[in-house]
Amino acid sequence: MNKAENNIRKTSFKKAGQALIDHIQETEKVDLQRIEQSLEDLKNSYQIQHKRRKLWLYAASAAASLLIAALSINFLYSPNSYDWDMLATSLLNDSIPHQDKEITLITQNDRMKLSNEASLEYKKNGTLQVNKEDVTKESPVRHKEKLNHIIVPKGKRATITFSDGTSMYINSGSHVIYPSDFDKNKREILVEGEVYLEVAKDPKRPFFVKTKDFDVKVLGTTFNVSAYKDDAIASVVLVEGKVEVDNNNQKTTIRPNEKIAITHGESTVSIVDVNEYISWKDYIMLFAEHRVGDVFTRLSRYYGVHIECDPSIASYPVSGKLDLKSGINNSLDILTELLDIKYKTEPDGSIRIFQ
């Protein structure tokens, strides 16, 4: 495909996407079947051979952005009937956003690339600050609950302070969907990946963290949620306060120093050292009798480097403490020395762990 043909395809894609958004704005509702069919048609128009995969990724990423825009508009025009579960299914199951190597913030009006360790703060007057600098001041709109989508790829981290005073640390390989300003009756966000939250107390507005498989309800507390879609086990670990976890309508209340683990729809509660689960926000990894394969998975996400561990090694138990700021090689040196194993960096930058 030559450059002219490529530009024609990109232009037609943008026109088709804008037509769908215009339709939603005119009718003030979303026809899910139309969205899905439109996205399928757009993707099919870009179906190409494997050697042109980069163009396909461009189209797929644009399709994901279109869906975000479409659903955001529906939320803006019909917030009372908005289905958060539909949004979770449509967006949090989509791996396309993780193709990007930079932190991306998608709002109704903009798409911004952010530096690693980006710090976002939403002021009560509507101003968004990134790293202490004003980025935008929201103009008055019909409803305040504008959706934002922050994508934090592997190897990156970010923090958000919401206008109610709640703080959120976002770990590598995660994305979060949230409104610019919370509703007067409740506060809700969607998470895929891992976040640590310090929720500002507000008895009149409970705080909900929604994931693909379970919901967490709090009034004011500090806790960690891990809900990566490629992990077999999801978990909520409570530092202080009290939370209620709703897993398929089975509600469980956990207290400080407790963890609820969820796998295949089943949940178990245990007492844990919470520092093992929250130290990542302070650039420390703690683990006691963990499978080394799981430790390598966490390192892979944190540093944004693919690590392949020999299956015969993956189940080895390991305990220790890693200073994540010291770099991936230092972490690998410590682990391989502890377990008397080896690692090799391949030409493509990936790392292989072997006996």
Image (cartoon, rainbow, N blue to C red):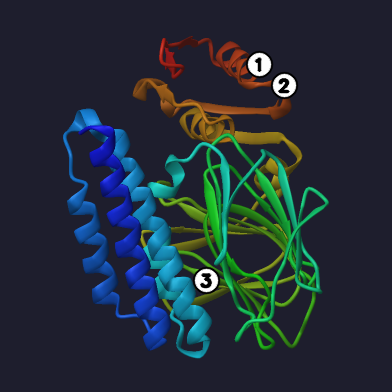
* Mark 2, other Cα within 10 Å: few <14 / some 14–19 / many ≥20: few
Q: Secondary structure at mark 3?
A: strand
* Mark 1, other Cα within 10 Å: few <14 / some 14–19 / many ≥20: few
Whether pointer 1 and pointer 3 mark residues with C-beta atoms closer than 8 Å, the reply is no
Q: CA distance from mark 2 to mark 1?
A: 6 Å
- Image quarter in which the N terminus is found: top left
Residue 202, percent from left and from top = 78, 81
Residue under numbered circle 2? 326
Whether pointer 2 and pointer 1 mark residues with C-beta atoms closer than 8 Å, the reply is yes
> Can the viewer see residue 175 in this picture?
yes
Residue 39, percent from left and from top = 27, 61
Q: Which mark is residue 343?
A: none
Residue under numbered circle 1? 330
Foreground mark, 3 or 2? 2
Image check: 122 left or right of 38? right
Q: Is residue 247 above or below residue 26?
A: above
Residue under numbered circle 3? 215
Q: Please name the amino acid that badge 1 sits on.
A: Asn
Q: Please name the amino acid that badge 2 sits on.
A: Ser
Q: Earlier in the sequence, mark 3 or mark 2?
A: 3
Image check: 88 left or right of 194? left
